Amino acid sequence: SRETAAERLRRLHPEIEDVWSTLKPSMDLSQLKRIRSPPKLAVTLLPFQIEGVSWMIQQEESEFQGGVLADEMGLGKTVQTIALILSRPSTKPNRPTMVICPTVALMQWRNEVRSKTVEGALSCFVYHGDNRIRDLEQLSSFDIILTTYATVESGFRRMKSGFQRKGQKMYEDSVLHALHLHRLVLDEAHYIKDRFSNTARAVWDLKADYKWSLSGTPLQNRVGELYSLVKLLRADPYSHYFCRQCPCKSLKWSFERRQCTECGHRSMSHFCWWNREILRPIQKHGPHGEGKLAFDRLRKLLSAMMLRRTKHERGNELGLPPRIVHTRRDLFSHEEEDFYEALYSQSKTRFQNFVQEGTVLNNYAHIFELLMRMRQSVNHPWLVTHRSDSKKDKDTCGICYEMAEDPIASECKHVFCREEMSMYLASVPEGQPPACPVCFRTLSIDLTQPAVERSEDVKKKRSKTNIVRRLDIEAWQSSTKIEAILEELRSGQSASSSIKTIVFSQFTTFLDLLEWRLQRAGIRCVKLDGRMSPQHRADVIEAFNTQPHLTAFLISLKAGGLALNLVSASRCIICDPWWNPATESQAMDRIHRLGQNRPVEVIRLIVENSIESRIDQLQEKKRLLFESTVGKDSSALGRLTEEDLRFLF
């Protein structure tokens, strides 16, 4: 009888036939052999952290040779990783551990390695900016190399695709890709979630004996994005491509003229095991039938390679102080109300035109701009009247109309803040192709590209175009929002001079105005935004943490939402709400985490009868919907539907 396709596949690739029945979940945590805290670790690990390090050691000895540590933010993923590095050093010379992290976390990692280990325990080198060692032997002599995703991607691109110099195409070897690492650690590993991005390819191409992904983002339902983390581990067969015609299998989709470079068979004869077994059944059937079977397989795979603990589960061990969140509601002054009502009326008219034409979702980029203007006007009318023009100024973000922080460029050559664009894309209605917020053409942009480099002239121009430099002091009028923040900061000072407060806003120009107003009121503060170099950021954080007279820290959500530890503060003011409540939770976690000894107070500022009070109601609606959903896919929180848009207007 003739051999069926399924029979031929089993004959050619016998290893995939019983893969699910033989896959063993990770050992029960209660059965783990607990390690002793490494002697060179300068801090005492909590019981659940010892459990975490013990699990990581077991994972390195398993077939995966690594895994995903997905503990909730604030549970000490960094210190557990440092303890792992101390517990299992390389037995071979010149095999360092490389940690890749976002730029904002670079100096924090360096400081954590220094403060959490005894002096001289680990040598650490920051490979970033001009500070790059080209000598392979010298670089590999360090215990830990710290670098960023953009640095790794840039080196990979120059090595593989080349670059232009004086009209000629040049190629350059990447010293990071020439290293043979003992261990590779990805902090905030969701930076490689797009499997087609150059950043993911650059990271996959690094050579390491053991590989780790650290991410506080729940991974259970982001099925497509999980593939990048599975492929990082090179887990067989979960991350491989297979040929239906011969025993060929590969980690890379490598074809020339539609023929496999390994076996010569056509691309149609090959398939991605992950897509076939997990992704497509879930996309096609959801949580039913074959989709349910795929979800069960995914859970089984995750249980074998991932560990996640939450603050709620480990509350007794953590001993975290309580966190109190309350919302302060204020009313506009008469002048602010007149300005806002005029802007709102104009915006609503434009929105109603889209509704009547039935083109609401097609004009999402236009509507997003209307919402942004209304949100800015609530903070201070001058954010709208004194905004820069992104069409005339190439360095201005096309979404928030401020000097772009961590700037990235679209294919249509417009510049945006990386985080602003990420939040914009997350909010685009499902099934709707995103449009460029500047030219409104279909948007194509890589969120993981290196930051657009700026000349010294641009940096000088930035200081000249600062909104404070353009203030007419005699015409200056404060705003309800600014005075509310000032009142809260003064109340914190009068109660106890040692209370420090973090002030979060999405708008850097608002923070510029606020900084000027606070200094006039005699409140000493520092500011952090995405326009600063890593060293400058580290210096500002160090000053705030160590100098008692600095009582307020103004932070751009775009720069400070991730990987910051600011437990020296016990109060947090969130100036402007976002429709995704998870964004606010991330900000709160900067101070409500391990190391915090005082009760934490979070103050959310809302101006009534404005877009903010509607966003506040929408947040609550989304939160309730999220909690009642079985799947709990947090990406749905950030997405705006047509119904949501109608509600906001």
Image (cartoon, rainbow, N blue to C red):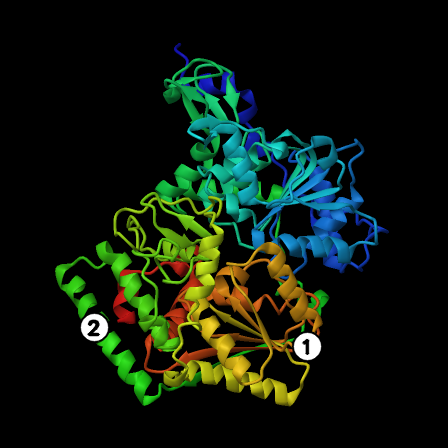
Q: Residue at x 44, y 26 (%)?
A: 168
Residue 94 image point, x, y percent? 76, 33
Choose between 417 and 613: the one closer to the eye. 417
Q: Residue at x 56, y 37 (%)?
A: 203
Choose between 540 and 212: the one closer to the eye. 540
649 in relation to 46, above or below = below
Residue 243 image point, x, y percent? 45, 20
Q: Secondary structure at mark 2?
A: helix
Disc nearest the viewer among 2 and 1: 2
Which quadrant of the view contains residue 244?
top left
Tell me which amino acid carries mark 2.
Gln
Q: Residues within 10 Å of mark 1 (few under 14, many from 20)?
A: some
Does residue 69 show up?
Answer: yes
Check the image and name the residue furthest to the top: 1
Residue 210 image point, x, y percent? 68, 36
Query: How far is disc 2 from disc 1 in space, using C-alphas?
Result: 46 Å
Pick the quarter of the image with the N terminus.
top left
562 in relation to 481, above or below = above
Q: Secondary structure at mark 1?
A: loop
Left or right relative to 641: residue 448? right
Q: Which residue is mark 2?
A: 346
Tell me which amino acid carries mark 1.
Arg
Q: Which residue is mark 1?
A: 598
Sequence-wise, which precedes: disc 2 or disc 1? 2
